[in-house]
Amino acid sequence: MKYYITLQIIRLKRWFKEVGLHPIIGVILASVLFILFSKYLFYKTAFAKFIFPLLALTVLVSLGDKQRNDQLKTIFDKGLRLKIRFFENAIVALPFLVYLLYEQQLIPILGLFIVSIILVFVPAGLNFKKAIATPFKRRPFENIVGFRKYFVLVGILYLLIFKAIQVENYNLAVVAFGSIFFVLMAFYLKPENIYFVWLFKDSAGNFLKRKLIDALICGSILTVPGLIGLGLFFWSTIMVSCIVFVVGLIYLCSMVLAKYSAYPNEINVPQGLLFALSLWFPPMLILVIVIFYKQSKRNLYLILE
Amino acid sequence: MMEIKNLSKKFGSVTALNDVNLSLEKGMVYGFVGKNGAGKTTLFKCISGIETHTGIIDTAFKNVKNHIGLLETNPNFLSRITGWEYLKLLCIARKITFDDFESKNIFDLPLDRYAETYSTGMKKKLALTAILLQQNDIFILDEPFNGVDIQSNILITEIINVLKEKDKIILISSHIFSTLKESCDQIFLLNNGKIEKIVLKENYTELENDLKMDVIGNKVDILNL
């Protein structure tokens, strides 16, 4: 077990180095960002006590993935495997539990604690043998993969919109609606194998155009029903909803460009900072998009032309 | 026709390919043999443009990579993508609108299932089907017979014969010499990133015996079985 944990630490150090950060600085930065984000979330919405444990749950579920657990089964005996899984879940859940304690949210603490323990023993995730149907069958691949990965999260956000409409809380509805765009952006976080870029009979510019059109079409398919719901039940604020929709799509496009601006590597610190800057100060988005587009075109040119 | 002139590739200080020169004709099948690490896969990746390299690849095509169907040793599959969607992606990439894939499913693959759940052989057959649907002019098949059942091996050999008749250029690597013997017009022996020998059909048996001698030698005796 000690060697396994050491290996995971080595992997984490390597990851930090790959994204251009010293591991110690990376850990400090991640901790500060976690605290700031948590404070912001609890300051912004009363529903943070539900959203916050849900965030922890998404990480716990990915750790408890059946395929991953099956791999652990082939390496370790049952006792050692359960110890490892317990340790992993504790490491992930602990910061969330501590912050929830600081916020004195006892019921979410209890819920998260129980789920963390259950997920040590029960493989998580939905492992369908049959493929989950998506509305994007003819437009592979990011949106198909992303939808199948995050459809539960999208469903929860739509449920939140529905609830918000019921209690006539526009703020909650529009936050949940905007959050769908963050889920859509997650579709573009991981770079695909170079083969899946190489095989395209396109110039770099046309390749990017194709990816952006796909993102806009699929992003709209997933968000327009929410926009219609907001429009129907909060007519007086339809302009705000439309602005969130348009800005969300623009951010989605900039995420697509961010992915290829670092390609074939993962999005690293410079891209991440630029993107964060545009989130903090939206007018920066125009400049960020231009920079990402130029970098993407340069990276793709080497592979496609 | 495809002319490869002085193709070299280095990974840091390690030379993977050293001054490779090849002249490949239409309607010919070329085999590549060599030990693990001899440079076969690197050569295929350089020819297809996935790896950068020095030297020249001269063809009649403006951008040769758009005419190459590359079957990798271990084909990559995106997670949560079905066989059907994989075929669709590879067709879209080459601007092919066809999507009645069931009618072309000669290997009887379960196209509605996630490709990542396929067996090794099924993955290879799916990847091969995809590059065949792309209607390429050059086929680079890295270990096409590896992990595939006997029935499909026979089918793949026949596909290679038909591609040859249709004037395609076909490059194959295989560790199973008999499969190359059957399909190839010429075999290149790669060693330490260099083309060590070009062997014509009439000399295949001699090459096979040389390879056996080189590989086996007295190594089994060392074990004192």
Image: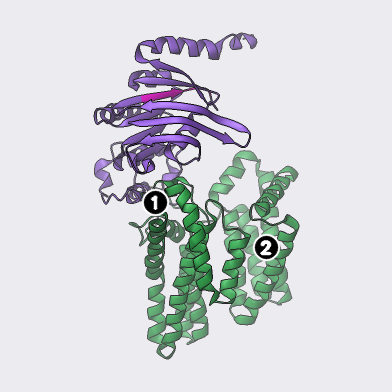
Chain colours: A green, B purple
Dot 1, crowdedness within 10 Å: few (<14), some or many (≥20)? few
Q: Chain of mark 1?
A: A
The boundaries of the magenta stretch are B30-35
Identify the amino acid type marked 2: Ala
Q: CA distance from mark 2 to mark 1?
A: 32 Å
Q: Earlier in the sequence, mark 2 or mark 1?
A: 2
Q: Main secondary structure of the magenta part?
A: strand
Using the image, tell me which numbered label, if any, was put on residue A304: none
Name the residue rendered at 53%, 68% in the picture. A288
Reply above or below: A303 against B4.
below
Reply above or below: B30 against B208.
below
Dot 2, crowdedness within 10 Å: few (<14), some or many (≥20)? many
Nearer to me, A108 or A8: A8
Q: Secondary structure at mark 1?
A: loop
Give the quarter of the image for residue B110: top left
Name the residue rendered at 35%, 11% in the picture. B202
Question: Which residue is disc 2 drawn over?
Answer: A93
